[in-house]
């Protein structure tokens, strides 16, 4: 049963990601990215990472994707009206070499993963543990061992807030 | 729970990374290129989470949380820059944006 669910979400993730690559319509790509992010969140849940999955949905689906769609809408004032359609299309170049490079990197990773026997190494590294909620442990770790990166992330978010507000302000000519 | 899915996680992650790379190389709309970068970051996160399964200290999950934070920051700043670029050049086609100042 778990295998069926896992394979379903894996296929959902990969198919929607491929649609982002294949489609020409930018808005279709954005909505397929929604499926990819939700599929990845489900894969996180199946790996026992519930807090990361909820963060993924909150940040990517609720934040980044909405920002991307706003970006699409704000950067297309004309649309594609001269052809009689109101679609926003993305051009593409280097199709052959782009696909060749991507397939090459995939082949490299595939053979490396196939040769490395990560599952055996990982099984000898960690004992199998009973899965339970990770929220409390992540909270405790963030406030003890990882408090410096946590504070640095806060400063980074503040700088990004100010920088984005300053950058996107209209300039006077 | 055993970690017998690890190979499939790594395979999914490798395919997502390759698709993201292909999007970045092939597509010429800035927003779609940003989507490709997000896909590559997600592939990396998937690896981190898959490897930290059964890890009692959860270091991989915490690292992936920080990756998510930095990815969100990157998307915000990139979109602000895209809005300025559109205001200046009136296009988001990457091949037509080849000057720092017009």
Image (tube, rainbow, N blue to C red):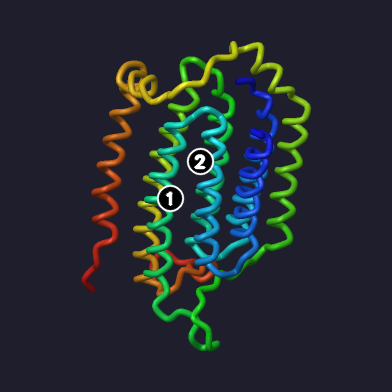
Q: Chain of mark 1?
A: A
Q: Quadrant of residue B88?
A: bottom left
Asked whether, in this view, residue A92 is left or right of residue B71, the answer is: right
Q: Nearer the viewer, residue B23 or A120?
A: A120
For image coordinates 57% across by 40% down, the residue present is B43
Name the residue carrying label 2: A41
Q: Is residue A105 above or below residue B86?
A: above
The location of residue A125, given as percent across then percent down, is 62, 12
Q: Quadrant of residue B28?
A: bottom right
- Quarter that holds the C terminus of chain A: bottom left
Task: Give the SS element for disc 1.
Answer: helix
For image coordinates 27% across by 36% down, the residue present is A155
Q: Chain of mark 2?
A: A
Q: Residues within 10 Å of mark 1 (few under 14, many from 20)?
A: some
The location of residue A5, given as percent across then percent down, is 63, 39
Q: Is residue B99 above or below residue B47?
A: below
Q: Nearer the viewer, residue A61 or A150?
A: A61
Q: Are marks 1 and 2 in contact (CB under 8 Å)?
A: yes
Task: Give the SS element for disc 2.
Answer: helix
Name the residue carrying label 1: A61
For image coordinates 50% across by 54% down, the residue present is A34
The location of residue B96, given as percent across then percent down, is 51, 71
Total labels drawn: 2
- Residue farthest front in this picture: A1
């Amino acid at each position: 049963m778990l295998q069926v669910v896992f394979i379903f979400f894996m296929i959902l993730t990969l198919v929607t990601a491929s649609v982002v690559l294949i489609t020409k319509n930018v808005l279709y790509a954005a909505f397929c990215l929604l499926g990819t992010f939700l599929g990845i969140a489900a894969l996180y849940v199946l790996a026992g990472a519930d807090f990361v999955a909820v963060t993924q949905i909150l940040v990517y689906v609720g934040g980044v994707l909405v920002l991307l769609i706003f970006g699409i809408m704000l950067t297309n004032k004309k649309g594609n009206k001269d052809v009689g359609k109101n679609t926003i299309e993305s051009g593409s170049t280097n199709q052959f070499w782009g696909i060749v490079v991507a397939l090459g990197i995939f082949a490299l990773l595939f053979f490396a993963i196939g040769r490395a026997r990560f599952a055996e190494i990982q099984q000898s590294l960690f004992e199998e543990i009973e899965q339970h909620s990770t929220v409390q442990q992540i909270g405790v770790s963030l406030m003890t061992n990882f408090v410096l990166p946590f504070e640095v992330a806060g400063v980074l978010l503040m700088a990004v807030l100010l920088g984005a507000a300053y950058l996107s302000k209209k300039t006077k000519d | 729970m055993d970690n017998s899915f690890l190979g499939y996680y790594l395979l999914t992650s490798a395919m997502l990374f390759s698709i993201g790379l292909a999007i970045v190389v092939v597509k010429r709309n800035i927003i779609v290129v940003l989507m490709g970068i997000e896909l590559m970051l997600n592939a990396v996160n998937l690896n981190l989470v898959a490897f930290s399964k059964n890890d009692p200290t959860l270091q991989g999950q915490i690292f992936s949380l920080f990756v998510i934070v930095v990815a969100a920051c990157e998307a915000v700043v990139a979109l602000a820059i895209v809005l300025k670029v559109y205001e200046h050049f009136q296009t988001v086609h990457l091949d037509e944006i080849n000057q720092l100042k017009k």
